[in-house]
Amino acid sequence: MIVDAHCHAGTGDGLTGPWDTAAPLSTYLRRADAAGIDRTVVFAPLTSDYPRANAEVARLVHGSRGRLTGFAFVSPTADRGHVAEMVHQAVDGWGFRGLKVHWRDGHITREIADVARARALPVIYDPAGDTGTVETVARAYPDVAWIIPHLSSFADDWKAQTAFVDQLVRLPNVFGDTSGVRYFDVLEDAARRAGPGKVIFGTDGPFLHPAVELTKVLALGLDPPARALVLGGNITRLMRGVRRDSHRPVPAAIP
Ligand SMILES: [Zn+2]
């Protein structure tokens, strides 16, 4: 079972680039199917309105018959004061299994980390190379699983990625995703030094080609048990412990 743990889906309301405009899945799914990817974790592209974008993701997940798993995108600034309610809707209503937070929306907050802790939700946090923040949140919330995409930098910041690998080795609750990483030696270093239990396959689809991203992971030459962890075992384990709240009225299944 190969799981892509990082893919965007639906629409944003910006016009800066694909990352905040549109993330259509049809081409991605054709490519992913051909590459042998069985399941995909999806979340919205960047937007100013995550409640709307998350609902759009919920409809895609619902219509996918198990092919897609949703993560709720939350903004540290725009959604301030509403994170618990958004998570209630997403996790209890739609069956979402994690959170996504991006540096462009603001610095990660205790509000988000507290909700993640209470619900045992893994958090994909893009820090734009700010490994100091990774250190701070991982230590302050050692019981939350922090998944850092692109080994911390989509922008190929080699210094940040190299520093991040040391954190991956030291901090048991920090994981790195492989999406968009170009410095292959750093990726190899992460898998070798931190171990396959700390590295998670992701593609950053539909913006990047899933077969290209998968080929990078296969090129690591891991033995089959290690490869199975990277390609799905790790993310599946992190999503398994999510706590749903059965004591509160559950919102309608699909908006
Ligand atoms: Zn992404």
Image: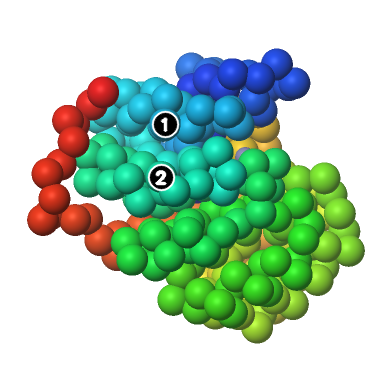
Under 8 Å from ligand 1: the CB of mark 1?
Answer: no
Task: Locate the C terminus and report the quarter of the image it occupies.
Answer: top left
Marks 1,2: beta carbons within 8 A: yes
Residue that appears at 77% across and 61% down = 130
The residue to which callout 1 is attached is 51
Whole-percent x and y of residue 158?
87, 59
138 left or right of 252 in image: right
Label 2 SS: loop
Q: How is the image coloured?
A: rainbow
Quadrant for ligand 1 reads top right
Q: Nearer the viewer, residue 117 or 129?
A: 117
| Mark pair 1, 2: CA separation | 10 Å
Tag of residue 82: 2
186 left or right of 255 in image: right
Question: Which of the 4 image quarters holds residue 146?
Answer: bottom right
Whole-percent x and y of residue 109?
56, 59
Q: Nearer the viewer, residue 171 or 78?
A: 78
Q: Nearer the viewer, residue 219 or 164?
A: 164
The amino acid sitting under disc 1 is Pro
User: How packed is label 1: few (under 14 Cα within 10 Å), some, or many (20 or more)?
Assistant: many
The amino acid sitting under disc 2 is His
Whole-percent x and y of residue 71?
42, 43
Residue that appears at 22% across and 55% down = 244
Label 1 SS: helix
